[in-house]
Image (cartoon, rainbow, N blue to C red):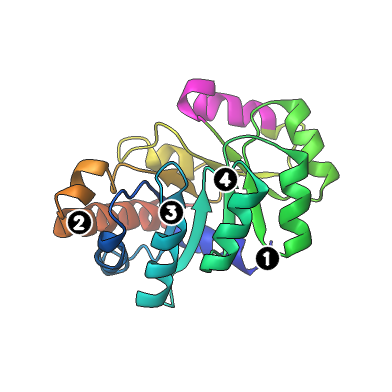
Amino acid sequence: MNDVMKRIAEIGIVPVIRIDDVTKAPKLAEALCAGGVPVAEVTFRAAGADQAIRAMREAFPEMLVGAGTVLTRAQVDAAVDAGAQFVVSPGFNPKNVEYCQKKGITIFPGCVTPGEIECALEYGLEVLKFFPAEAFGGLKTIKALSAPFGMVKFMPTGGISLDNLAAYLANPAIIACGGSYMVTAKLINEGRWDEITELCRKSVEIVREVRSNG
């Protein structure tokens, strides 16, 4: 794994963020860091995602900030120009994977079938997004896929919560989980930074407990 993957694995949880008001990005970054989660996946589901990425990187240079829901090469360019350190896509698009690799930026494409995983292996990918995790069978499916594809690690996203985070992280095939439960639109729009920080802290406690028992 490269340095980006190692940092994500160390943290164990990646907040998946849709931010509609770019001016809130620095405060959100501060709340995440205060909760012990210095990483963010800012999705391109909202306009101005690249501006939010830039604002978070400038406010907290030590953070690991990536771009999510990246569907086009133009979005890759916008993310990289804004300072994104990794890219996440919901599905597997070979052209986008090739483009990211040529630009030297880590990409985590979504893969949920054996065929998609085999394609990912052709590109030398080691860590894949598993999305939407719960809708595609969650841990049961990941365990089944890990039997023939033991060389691959997963970052499940979609339906992850404080209630199931420990179960996911206990699986050795999972390096981290992506989640939006600590960064919901309501919490961000209402500026409830203390609550975001507290949810991050609870997540970090779960990560530590699972790994100390492992």
User: Mark 3 or mark 2: which comes first in sequence?
Assistant: 3
Marked residue nearer the N-terminal end (4 or 2): 4
- Image point 52% across, 60% down: which residue? 8
Q: Which residue is mark 3?
A: 49
Horizontal and vertical percent position of residue 62: 44, 77
Q: Which residue is mark 1?
A: 2
- Specify the segment rendered in magenta: 132-145
Q: Which numbered disc flags the more N-terminal residue, 2 or 1?
A: 1
Q: Tag 3's secondary structure?
A: helix
How many numbered discs?
Answer: 4
Numbered badge on residue 70: 4
How many angstroms separate mark 4 from mark 2 (CA)? 29 Å
Quadrant of the frame with the N terminus: bottom right
Q: Is residue 50 left or right of residue 70?
A: left
- For the point 68% across and 29% down, the residue is 145
| Foreground: disc 3 or disc 1 | 3
Label whose residue precedes the other's in the sequence (1 or 4): 1
User: As drawn, which residue projects farthest toward the right?
Assistant: 122
Q: Is residue 203 magenta?
A: no
Is the Cβ of the residue at disc 1 closer than 8 Å to that at disc 4? no
Spatial CA span between label 3 and label 2: 24 Å
Crowding around mark 3 (Cα neighbors within 10 Å: few <14, some 14 to 19, many 20+) is many
Callout 2 crowding tier (Cα within 10 Å): few <14, some 14–19, many ≥20: some
Is the residue marked by circle 4 packed among few (<14), some (14-19), or many (20+) residues within 10 Å?
many
